[in-house]
Image (tube, rainbow, N blue to C red):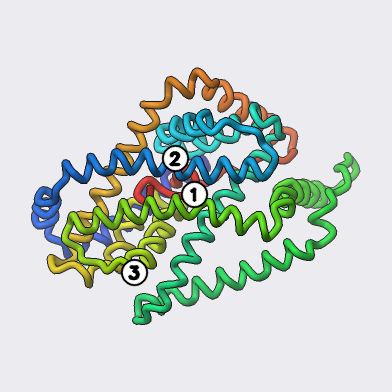
Amino acid sequence: MRSLVRRALPLLVAAFALVLALRGINLRELAQMTSDAPLLPLIGFSGLMVLANCAADTLAMYYVFKWFGLSLRFTDLYIIRAATYTLAVINYHAGQLGIIGYIHRVGKVPLSRASAYILFIVGVWVALLLIFAAGSLALGGAKAAALLPVLVMFFGGLLVYALLLTWPPRFLLSGPPPVTTHDSLLTKVWRRLWRVTHKLWEPLHQAGIKGHARALVVRVPHLLVLLVWHFVALRCFHIEVPVLVAVLYLPVVFAVASLPISVQGLGTSQMAAKYFFSEFSPRGDAAVLAYSLTMTAISTVSSLLMGILFLRAGAKLGLKEMTAEAQEELDHEAAEGSEAAPEPPAGQQPGAVSASAQ
């Protein structure tokens, strides 16, 4: 029942958010604006951008893994990354397991450490989006001011995190004592949580502030690809957003779409796009929703096709076996009460960004 609720909740959130986004919109007008847009050129352009997006995403991952001491081939990592797109659209957890299994087998690192690398990459991506979003405060206005509480919490948390990286508490650096049969249930749970935290903290502490900064820099090309892709799409729907506004507000839309509360960012990304870009559309909210829904559809389908295109090459590299091996070992560790990679909510997509943002 818990698994059913976990899978159904993102669907319900997406449906509810989509209803709110479409409230007061003439659906015939929405369909007309969609059909009026140059869809064939946009689809062709999107085909090129999804290849570039995967390349930029893989490049950032490649350098992060290299800095952690993993010797991987870029072409193989690109194939695995592309092949997991289909897996992730169908089942986010399976997509993540494919990458974790690849790192585990080829990089010869424990699963807990491979999982920590992926969480590090996800955290860097979210941080980069919020750093760009902070620039929107320079634009002023009520919409930028609405982001202030979130950004204050983010930068406050970032400061605390930087202090922990510089002067980490002793309990984060040293693992807990082993669990014994004489320990109480509460003690066992606490020590196992301590062990998980310690395993996840090790690579973060190893990267340090310099490593985090480098990871942010190599992730910038990925964000730039997305910005160009969506800026062109906005123009296709006659949404005249200035370049600076798009650069500062689109990362906010990407961040909202990446929240693990909806399926592929459906509904939530439409609400965010409507909030930030309606004032730049001479044709009203319908044009913004037409852009956002079209990009969600194009991104989801292109991710599926991208994965299918590379699935056979991924199979030759052992993607299926690596995914199954990772799942089996993680299940075994979980059954023993050992550390396991935390399973993300079902509504999110690979690499910390949903299909609508990809």
Q: Are marks 3 and 2 in contact (CB under 8 Å)?
A: no
User: Looking at this view, is 15 or 267 the one in front?
Assistant: 267
Query: Label 1 belongs to which residue?
Result: 352
Residue 8, percent across and down?
A: 41, 44
Question: In the picture shown, does residue 231 fall above or below 133?
Answer: above
312 left or right of 295? right
Residue 141: name its quadrant: bottom left
Label 2: how many residues lie within 10 Å, few (<14), some (14-19) or many (20+)?
Answer: many
User: Looking at this view, is 118 or 337 the one in front?
Assistant: 118
Instruction: Say which element carries label 3.
Output: helix
**For residue 3, which numbered disc appears in the image?**
none
Q: Which amino acid is tagged 2?
A: Ala
Query: Label 3 belongs to which residue?
Result: 244
- Residue at 60%, 48% (x, y): give it: 119
Q: Which amino acid is tagged 3?
A: Leu
- Residue at 36%, 61% (x, y): give it: 250
- Residue at 53%, 51% (x, y): give it: 218
- Residue at 22%, 55% (x, y): give it: 291
User: Looking at this view, is 262 or 308 the one in front?
Assistant: 308
Q: Which amino acid is tagged 1?
A: Ala
Instruction: Say which element carries label 1.
Output: helix
Q: Are marks 3 and 1 in contact (CB under 8 Å)?
A: no
Residue 77, percent across and down?
A: 53, 33
